[in-house]
Image (cartoon, rainbow, N blue to C red):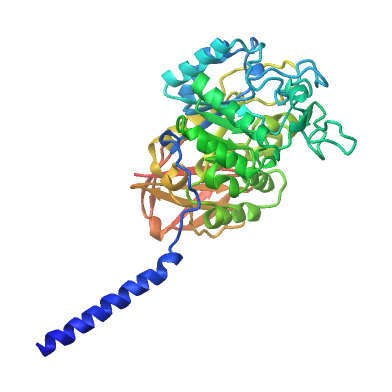
Amino acid sequence: MKYFTVFFIIFFNFSFINGQIKDDLKNYQPKPFVNLTHPEWSKNATIYEVNVRQYSKEGTFKAVENDLPRIKNLGIDIIWLMPIHPIGEKNRKGSLGSYYSVKDFHGINPEFGTMQDFKNLVNKIHEMGMHVIIDWVGNHSAWDNPLAKEHPDWYTKTKEGNFQPTPWYDWNDVIDFDYDNPELRKYMTESLKFWITKTNIDGFRCDTAGFMPTDFWDEARKELDEIKPVFMLAEWESRDLLKDAFDMEYSWSLYEKMKDATTRNKGIANLVEYLAHDVNTFPRNAYRMTFVENHDMNSWNGTPQKNFGAGLETAMVFAATVNGMPLVYNGQEAGLDRSLKFFDKDPIVWKPHRNFNIYQKLFKLKHENHALWNGKYGGEMIRVVNDKQDKIISFYRESSGDAVLPIFNFSKETLTVNLNSAYFKGIYTELFSEKKYNLGDETSLTMKPWEYLVLVKN
């Protein structure tokens, strides 16, 4: 009995102490940064930006609808339509104006078709197993938007009491909203809900999202998700928007670092730093949109051919294999090599191009290989050490039994590189050449200038 009592006391004390330790650690357990739930269909998605005006000679929803089989064949999951609303006439730029000067947040630009034409496009996109988001310009409106007369208190003003463009910008075809006004917030939230309920779209790409308060977006997302699970893309780069409001944001940083490594001749140090920050500081279950072109870059910063030079394909493949969701801007897959006019008609010239095949292969791999999936569903980028780390980037991603090992020569030189592949041994098939590679403890490769290899583990 004495031994039992001693045992019981020891056991009780151990259990008590162990429980106390667990209680003491409760407040120190890791917590996920992202609170929102991404739509299930976004976990391995790709995205395609459509400039309806320039997409075809007709510049209509119907013309886009007719081309959906080609977009689907490219491997696209989300179609992002640039603003579809009527464009302001007062202080208009060019002959047709900027899509981002919105005259009616509930209307359809008559140049593109009717509300029914738009609904038909949305329905067809859904029938083909894709999803659609529309551009939302909540920061400002056209000068002749009726809200300016009906609710002038919803806008910021100059010291003289006049309407003004967004401060510090030369956007003189628009006037700036004041989100300190709760009535404006309610109107904008109801307008977002209008498009979800009336047309069954799947979400929004939000222009200059960081110019509006984060708490506005947090509340809007909550109310939209009550209607259906939505997908939200922020034209911004900030962690706070990813917590409760947005599934994905732009990766402007990657775009700039890839330019550093190609046409700016700065080497790969900044690009490697980007990868290090992505792994160590970016929320694990948030999405980044990666790209070598979008409408802003194309219209105002020149073509990808200019921005990335001989390293363009290297940058394209890099942006599609690092952590993130790759974007294609319409025409890019056809080798678009000029800046499209922004305020006037300037149709894309469609033609066969190797870019289509490159993206098609990459997107097929992304859909099938868990290592390249988005957010927490994909594999973390692990550096594969090599002896040319000032010019060659190599990394490994693995998830759910799938693995890829991409290698990029970001230089003008032919290089022999030795990879420390001891932890990544196995048989791999290169995505584009279908050549087999047997990786041992150390692997030696000779790579041509700007050459890339996407090794897929068998």
Which of these two is toward me, 5 or 427? 5
Position in image of residue 183 (x %, y %): 66, 33
Q: Where residue 84 sits in the image (x, y, percent)?
A: 63, 20
User: Which quadrant of the figure has residue 175?
Assistant: top right
Left or right placement of residue 199 versus residue 340 in this view: left
**Which residue is found at the position 44% from the left and 21% from the top?**
126
Residue 202 image offset from top left, x and y in percent:
50, 28
Q: Position of residue 98 (x, y in %)?
A: 74, 23
Q: Is residue 372 above or below residue 445?
A: above
Quarter of the image holding residue 7? bottom left
Q: Is residue 379 left or right of residue 322?
A: left
The relative height of residue 153 versus residue 420 in the rendered view (above or below) is above
Depth check: 215 or 57 in front?
Answer: 215
- The number of numbered badges drawn on the structure is 0
Which is nearer the eye, 263 or 343?
343
Q: Quadrant of the C terminus?
A: top left
